[in-house]
Image (spheres, rainbow, N blue to C red):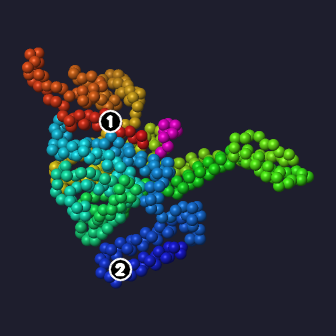
Amino acid sequence: MAVAQSRRKTLLDTMNAARESALTPELRSAISTLMARSDFAELAGMTFAGRRNLYKNLGYKRTLKPADYRERYKRGGIAKRIVEAFPRSTWRGGGELVEDEDPDTETKFEVAFDEMNTRLKIWSIFERTDILAGLGQYAIIFIGGPGEVNTPLKKCKPEDIKYLTPFSERDITLEGVVEKATDERFGMPEFYNLSRVGSLSSVGLRVHHSRIIHVADGLLDDPLFGTPRLEAVWNYLDDLDKVVGGGAEAFWKRADRGMHVQIDPLLQVTEPMREELRNEIADYTDQLKRNLTTQGVSLTPMGSDVANISPAAATLIDLISATTGYPQRILMGSERGQLASSSDQSNYDDRVQDRRTEFAHPTVVDSYVKRMQGIGALPECDQYETRWPEVDELDEEQKMALAYKAAQTNQAQGETVITSDEIRDWFLGREPLTADQIDDLDPEDDAIIPPDPEDPDADGPPIKLMTAKRQRLMKLKKRKSKGGYW
């Protein structure tokens, strides 16, 4: 509790200094909020009126930093799954920005974004930023546009945007906060100081906020800082390391259980005899020698109970799965996971779709599009939507079984309840058949070449080529986005 009292005293001193200075009421409120959060953080794990500190007794780290999350992500095994599963499922297969519903009509906005995506790999950048946001409270996309990076990003052409680079919270410090409560950016930083070290070249940049797309997942009462994906399960991951690591250590010790060396008390043991015995045992223990030559010495293997770590590990996996919302099929990728109920799979797919609608589009995609339109790098449009690949986890056999049941429904009713086109579309994910099509045409093969006007056998008007937009949408529909991690 002494640490908490010391920290509170420091904050009180800061608050007193704020009262005596010309700080705005907004900043004073922020300091007061910081004090409340500090007090609340110190309460975690305290029981018996503060006499027992579970965090200290169980070895849990109380204050977690972005570097802690990054190290566990790199070395923690299951932690990598927890951080990546939702982003991988959300952005798998990319997407398509659609302004006009007509697949044969390509607007200037759609063409411009597709060209920009081809050059900058936008969907991949979004996915990487989403993963980095889970390794801390936020991540950013640094827009490599014209002008000095510490100045506002001004009007420019699409080709003036040279690159998009994601940064994690670990490599960022925030500078200056918008204090005016009537400003739409109230509480947000004016500048982002980027200081990535460890790549081919170190980065040290002071970047204006207009060149930054701020991405935070799991926002609650703060528009700036989200919730790290490993925070809620950190203690469980510590416990899992103890169980698995302790079990491995126990196995190692049981595999080489050791020996009890008993020397006959009637035997006169000289120092050379002791040294020879030590060498014999060392050769047996450390080398490949599997026999011992002794005189007046009895060797007894030391036994031990076999520890079964499976129940403890399974309990922790259950807790981690429940806390993160991942079915064990996603979390573990095991045989048990493959037998997970269709209800679990459906719930996970629903969460991926919700995440696309409530987070990916408004927080990432739309923020980027609005920023590009604001500087003239993308054409203005009244409205648009993000089309995502379908979330589909059924294999071909399961699809055919559903299609067969649908056909049986028609037979049982004695009338057409579900048309053949609907069966192909809903259950098989295929286009309706026409007289000029076959089942498995790739979109590239669907483009029809107009007749040669000099060919005497060519008749009829030229047929319109399939637009690039229609081809992209068809590819998007065929490119199923697996609800699972892989």
Amino acid of disc 2 = Ala
**Quarter of the image holding residue 441?**
top left
Residue that lies at the very extreme toward the front in this rendered image: 272
Element type at marker 1?
A: loop
Q: Does residue 322 appear left or right of residue 302 in this picture?
A: left
User: Which amino acid, mark 1?
Assistant: Arg
Residue placed at 39% from the left, 74% from the top?
Answer: 32
Q: Are marks 2 and 1 in contact (CB under 8 Å)?
A: no
The image's mark for residue 156 is none
Circle 2: element type: helix
Would you call the spot at circle 2 few (<14 residues within 10 Å), some (14-19), or many (20 or more)?
some
Q: Which residue is mark 2?
A: 18
Q: What residue is drawn where x is 57% and y is 65%?
A: 56
Check disc 1: other Cα within 10 Å, few if <14, some if 14-19, many if 20+: some
What x and y, as percent, mark residue 296? 87, 47
- Which of the two labelled residues, at mark 2 and mark 1, occupies the earlier sequence position? 2
User: Residue at left 52%, top 51%?
Assistant: 319
> Residue 17 falls in which quadrant of the image?
bottom left
Query: What's the CA distance linking mark 2 and mark 1?
Result: 57 Å
* For residue 354, above or below residue 479: below
Look at mark 1 in the image and give the residue it sits on.
479
Can residue 201 be spotted in the picture? yes
| Residue 64: image location, x then y, percent | 47, 62
Q: Is residue 170 magenta?
A: no
User: Which segment is the magenta one?
Assistant: 331-340
Figure quadrant of the C terminus? top left
Query: Horizontal placement of 245 versus 458: left or right?
Result: right
Q: Residue at x 27, y 66 (%)?
A: 190
Q: Is residue 97 visible?
A: no
